Amino acid sequence: MTAFHEILFPLDIALKSAGGPERRTEIVSFGSGREARNARWADSRRRYDAGYGIKTLAGLQSVVAFFEERRGRLHGFRWRDRLDHTSSAPGLTPSPLDQGIGIGDGVTSAFPLLKTYGAGFAPYARPIAKPVDGSVRIAVGGSELDGGAFACDAATGIVTFAAGNIPAPGAAITAGFSFDVPVRFDTDYLEVDLSAFAAGAIPKIPVVEIRL
């Protein structure tokens, strides 16, 4: 299986990138003017272009080195989305009450991290597979747990409760966290343009989210 490298793309460059979520919707138009719409993907997929963040020759060289070590499209890595990288509302510090991740049944000890978007019509629960190590806070029934009561695997986003701390039946389990997006390069060729400006630039560095 292709490896995933638990390393973050250069942060100063990622935070100046462009991109966002993509969905795949199939639309069939009828002669009456009506249409049928069908979602081809259950989950959105994010795409970014890191080329906007290259401002210096040093930045250019760091991206080329990062690209080479990932072998182009071969290996995945972590990406920090400036727009959306915490469980909380923009500008707020993550709280253990931010996101619901499950309801206790007295038996289940492992729950995946989720982030829910929307509330009134069709909320979307996004799986969070790459939380930032040490950032996860958990509450059960509204009370925050100490770190010894649970563990969160930063490589999978699975929260596992320790023996004696498994949530009771009906208890709401909530979480707060920071997270990265698992991605890969979407090209095997970087076209480096040193004439773009004095320091150097890469016109396009396409990056796409991957499912783990």
Image (spheres, rainbow, N blue to C red):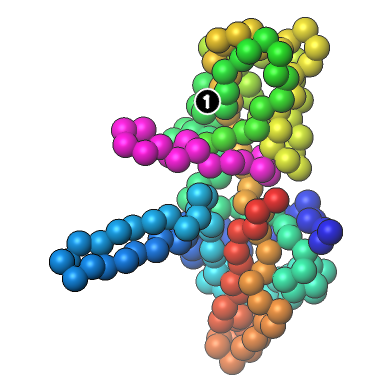
Q: Is residue 113 above or below residue 48?
A: above
Q: Is residue 30 magenta?
A: no
Magenta residues (range): 116-134
Q: Residue furthest bottom?
A: 195
Res 169 → quadrant: top right
Residue 31 visible in the snapshot: yes
Res 209 → quadrant: bottom right
- Camera-nearest residue between 129 and 64: 129
Q: Residue at x 26, y 68 (%)?
A: 29
- Camera-nearest residue between 142 and 161: 161
Q: Is residue 133 magenta?
A: yes
Q: Residue at x 63, y 48 (%)?
A: 180
Check disc 1 and report its element: helix, strand or loop.
strand
- Camera-nearest residue between 31 and 45: 31
Q: Position of residue 46 (x, y in %)?
A: 53, 58
Q: Residue at x 54, y 15 (%)?
A: 172
Q: Residues within 10 Å of mark 1 (few under 14, many from 20)?
A: many
Q: Label 1, on which residue?
A: 100
Judge from the rendering whether residue 128 lies leftward or rightward of residue 24; answer left or right.
right
Q: Position of residue 126 (x, y in %)?
A: 53, 42
Quarter the N terminus occupies: bottom right
Q: Position of residue 127 (x, y in %)?
A: 59, 41
Q: Of the residues shown, which amino acid type is indicated by label 1? A: Gly
For the stretch drawn in magenta, what is the main secondary structure? loop
Q: Is residue 185 above or below residue 159?
A: below
Q: Residue at x 61, y 80 (%)?
A: 202
